[in-house]
Image: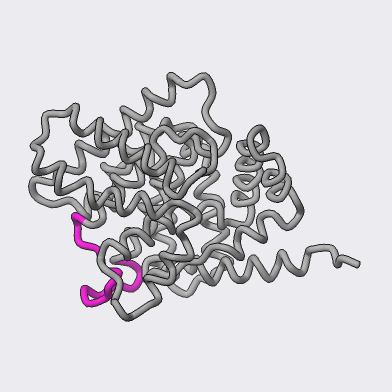
Amino acid sequence: MNDDLVWLEQFQAQLVAKPNLSPAQITAGLDLLFTNPELMQLSFSALIKRLIESPVWQGFDYDNNPYKALCLKLSNAIEVYNQALKAEPAYHSRSHFKEVCLGITLLVAQQNSPIPIDVSDPWYLSAEDAWLLLFSAIGHDFGHPGMMNAVPFEIEKKSIEKIDLWLRSLNLSSDFIAELMPKVETIILATDPMYLNSLVNIIQNTSPPPTKLNYLSMLMVEADLLASSLPTHGAVLTAALATEWQPHYPDKAQTLKAPDGHLKFLQHITFLGSHAQRLALNDSRLELIEQLQKSQPISS
């Protein structure tokens, strides 16, 4: 057993042992999970090493799995890159990278517990699907400058370029990279915040039906948003994003700092997937919106 992630395993065990937990109870557990001192003390690459060794990811392992080594190597490369920065962005730092990778771990872990997701469910993940998501989560904000996109997908494309260049620096076959990168590109491009509504429309539309990559992209976005959707930690992250934006977009930063800043964020996002349902993420979001609306001062 990996003692370093016992807090994650305990959370998972509680979900299995108590399948009737309310959304508020699950969210309270998630809030504690994302503020766990051990998580906060671990480096990004150390967390990835421990995640890969954890029961969740061991359960998704398969013969000749190339992703285990690549995930660890990419996290090390990003660790080195960010350590060399004069200062990391206040929000898009290695702390965010850790939270997104924890988020994707929590989501994929719901495939088998407490209620299994059936193989016929379009959200069902193969072992390779799951590892592709972890790899994409690790690299999704590689080199993020702490800015907003001036044009659609601007920052996401730069992260994809960094991953592609890094892969080409390794002793990998060009065929492997040519097969991997279009999938990674689709998933990471979907994390552009301005693309969320389009992605939701694709998922909710039945003609044409969503593709597997559409579902994987939504899972990636859900992992990206998970920590920020939480009642306590989410408010802290909203403030961190405001700090990141303040030098470049003071008006938008003030919008986030306003009493209803976190509320507006929650109203903008959604959680759609079968894995997210197991964590009651959308029910929790709606309950928190209702609570925040009641606590807002009535304007004259």
Of helix, strand and loop, which mostly describes the magenta segment? loop
In the rendered view, does 37 fall on the left or right side of 265? left
Reply yes or no: does residue 215 show up in magenta. Answer: no
Q: Quadrant of the C terminus?
A: bottom right
The quadrant where residue 142 appears: top left
Res. 146 in view = yes
156 left or right, relative to 118: right
Q: Is residue 189 above or below residue 145?
A: below
Q: Nearer the viewer, residue 176 or 61?
A: 176
Instruction: Tell me which residue sits at (31%, 46%) in the image.
Output: 136
Furthest residue toward right: 300
Q: Position of residue 217 (x, y in %)?
A: 34, 58
Residue 55 coordinates in the image, percent (x, y): 27, 50
**Range of the magenta residues?**
112-128
* Residue at 36% over, 32% down: 46
Q: Is residue 26 above or below residue 60?
A: below
Please, which colouring scheme is shown? one colour
Q: Quadrant of residue 266?
A: bottom right
Give the vertical position of 12 relative to 68 (above or below): below
Residue 114: percent from left, percent from top: 35, 69
| Residue 277 at least partly seen | no
Q: Residue at x 36, y 30 (%)?
A: 78
Q: Quadrant of the N terminus?
A: top left
Residue 119 highlighted magenta (yes or no)? yes
* Left or right: where 67 falls relative to 108: left
Of residues 61 and 16, the one drawn nearer to the viewer in this rendering: 61
Residue at 60% x, 71% y: name it.
Answer: 286
